[in-house]
Image (spheres, rainbow, N blue to C red):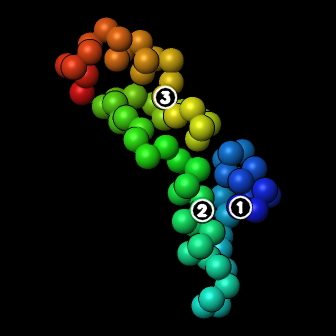
Amino acid sequence: MIPQVERALIAGHDFVLLGERGQGKTRLLRALAGLLDEWTPVIAGAELGEHPYTPITPESIRRAAQLGDDLP
């Protein structure tokens, strides 16, 4: 993983991958996908967390504790 790309993503910057075939664009995207958790819950109506390493917000944790299995 290129550290500059990882920091840019965490900071919320947009970027474009340009290059000819065989330059590693797909490999870079697959490496980026490896940074994400395999299982991240999606809660209806919840805001997304700003940081990709901690996507679950405190509000979502509170709602999950209150609603349990009835969580949408």
Residue 44 sits in which quadrant? top left
Query: In which quadrant of the rendered view does residue 23 lie?
Result: bottom right
As drawn, the residue found furthest toward the left would be 70
Residue 17 position in % (x across, y down): 65, 74
Q: Label 1: state its secondary structure.
A: loop
Asked which secondary structure carries label 2, the reply is: helix
Which residue has dot 2 on it?
A: 31
Q: Nearer the viewer, residue 48 or 5?
A: 5
Q: Is residue 35 left or right of residue 45?
A: right
For disc 1, the marked residue is 1
Q: CA distance from mark 2 to mark 3?
A: 22 Å
Q: CA distance from mark 1 to mark 2?
A: 6 Å
Reading the image, the residue beneath label 3 is 56
Label of residue 14 in the image: none
Q: Is residue 3 left or right of residue 65?
A: right
Residue found at the very far bottom of the displayed protein: 21
Residue at x-position 60% and y-position 38%: 53
Give the amino acid at mark 1. Answer: Met
The reply to whether discs 1 and 2 touch (Cβ–Cβ < 8 Å) is yes
- Residue at screen point 71% across, 53% down: 6
| Image spot of residue 43 (x, y percent) | 34, 30
> Secondary structure beneath disc 3?
loop
Which amino acid, by three-letter code, is at mark 3?
Ile
